[in-house]
Image (cartoon, rainbow, N blue to C red):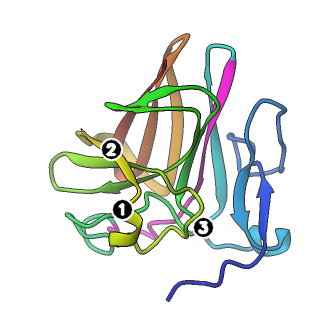
Amino acid sequence: MRPTPGLVIALTLVAAGGSPWVTSAQTPPCAFRGAPSALLERPSPLDSVVMRLGDAEGKLCYGRPSAEGAPRVGLEFPFGSPWQMGANEPTTLHLPFPARVGSVDLGPGSYSLYAIPAAGDWTIVVNGNPDRWGAPIGADVRAADIGSFRSTPTPTGGYVERLTFAFEPSGPAAGTLVYSWEGIRVAIPLVRR
């Protein structure tokens, strides 16, 4: 069942730990739905990752579900089915500049990301609707898809209990968003155009 959205509150989390709630003048805010006290009590903590590319910053906002020691991807989130790569609101990418995400060219704006996991390559999808609820991802959501690309998961080298995104710069205007959860790591290349 889909929760009632309630009040939308724009908050920004520090990338390193999920609290305190801080906003930078350059970094767009994360839009999480609910009263601040309810947001702090969610079982999947809210987090964000800031991506500095050149003289500007983008941001990825997401919820961090716990695996609770059981396999989730491939079972609860079945192979071949769209999955939001987070919890609650969609995993949302805010870009104040034109960029290429994987092989998808984007203008400045906000986008949601989701994946279609598989035993082999994953399909990462960029969607034009960042204001929807995260799940389910049906035909109505997929109608706003902008493009997709494939990424081959690699081992994390250790078990990751709580879903995590990080940004690894590879140059002044390029880097990789890295999804890590359970035993896999999925790379999402990002280049400022």
Q: Is residue 118 left or right of residue 22?
A: left
> Marks 2 and 1: in contact by CB < 8 Å?
no
Residue range (magenta): 56-72
Residue 70 appearing in the image: no
Q: Which of the 4 image quarters holds residue 62?
A: bottom right
Q: Which residue in the protein does label 3 denote?
A: 44
Q: Position of residue 46 (x, y in %)?
A: 66, 58
Closest to the observer: 137 or 107?
A: 107
Check if residue 62 falls in the magenta segment: yes
Q: Which residue in the protein does label 1 denote?
A: 143
Query: In front of the other: label 3 or label 1?
Result: 1
Q: Is residue 80 left or right of residue 180?
A: left
Name the element at disc 1.
loop
Q: Which residue in the protein does label 2 denote?
A: 147
How far apart are the two marked residues, 3 and 1, measured between alpha carbons?
28 Å
Residue at left 84%, top 44%? Answer: 22
* Amino acid at the residue labelled 2: Gly
Q: Is residue 16 left or right of residue 11?
A: left
Task: Return the residue found at the far left.
Answer: 120
* Amino acid at the residue labelled 3: Ser
How far apart are the two marked residues, 2 and 3, measured between alpha carbons?
28 Å
Check if residue 159 falls in the magenta segment: no
How far apart are the two marked residues, 1 and 2, measured between alpha carbons?
11 Å
Residue at left 43%, top 61%? Answer: 84
Residue 89 appearing in the image: yes
* Amino acid at the residue labelled 1: Ala
Q: Position of residue 184 (x, y in %)?
A: 32, 47
| Placement of 175 over or under 150, stated as above or below | above
Q: Is residue 73 left or right of residue 4?
A: left
Q: Position of residue 92 (x, y in %)?
A: 56, 51
| Placement of 118 over or under 177, stated as above or below | below
